[in-house]
Amino acid sequence: MDNKTMEVFQKIAMEETMEVDGVESQSKSTKVVHLLRRFLGVQQRRAEAYTKLRRGFAEYMVGGRDSAYQQLCNEITVEFNDCSKHVLEMESLLLNPEYCRNDLAHLLRLVQEQEKQKLHLTAKIQVLKKIGRPSERIVSHEHCRFRNLVEHECVHVHEITEATGTEEAEADADYDNALKEAIRGVQDAVTSINEYLEEVRYEIDALEAY
């Protein structure tokens, strides 16, 4: 076999290798895109769960049954746990040599952390709203002594002084600050999550254009 013939065979071999590498690369990109789209689907489930939770809490606050609200919280907890399970599986796959996308695995991890913070603070906001400001809470007369159906000796009656007024005002201020801080924390988490999701969408577009 002369040199010219050898060069032709080498060129053909190189072209075939490049075609195989291109197919494998395309296949890997397709898998990553599929995984990221699944992740966006999970995020959609989380968004729908939050909508359901907010609606249920609003109904509870205007006279809904406590048992119904607790049932809703249990359902939402199961849904969020299932979402987290799926994202952790995706994160693990992206770390696998078959995908080898540690950067995307890290991105999903960041979303998970912000989702955890968002859920924690959402629960805190609802607890605070349930109990209300200290000065506006309804007093229970369970331990009072009743003379008849309309008269009783109220154990809650106390002399109103400047000191007690100051304490009540401070308690209200602490409550307001805690509520504002939790709301601000949720807003920050939502902003971060949306930024990370934009990165995911950008990655999908880049892989599909490849």
Image: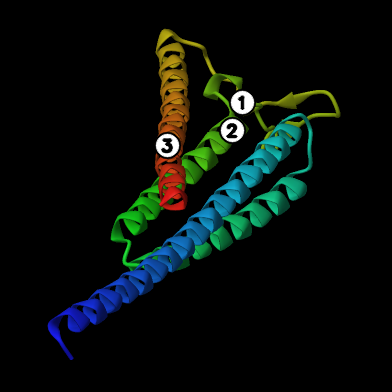
Distance from Cα at disc 3 to Cα at disc 2: 24 Å
Q: Disc 2 marks which amino acid?
A: Ile
Say if mark 3 contacts mark 2, CB within 8 Å. no
Going by the picture, which residue comes out furthest to the top? 162
Q: Disc 1 marks which amino acid?
A: Arg
Say if mark 3 contacts mark 1, CB within 8 Å. no
Colour approach in the figure: rainbow
Label 3 sits on residue: 189
Q: Disc 3 marks which amino acid?
A: Ala
Identify whether 183 is placed above or below 90: above
In this view, the mark in front (3 or 1): 3
Tell me, yes or no, if residue 43 can be seen here: yes
Tag 3, which secondary structure? helix
Label 2 sits on residue: 131
Mark earlier in primary sequence (3, 1): 1
Say if mark 2 contacts mark 1, CB within 8 Å. yes
Q: Residue at coordinates 43% horizontally, 32% vertically from top-left? A: 191
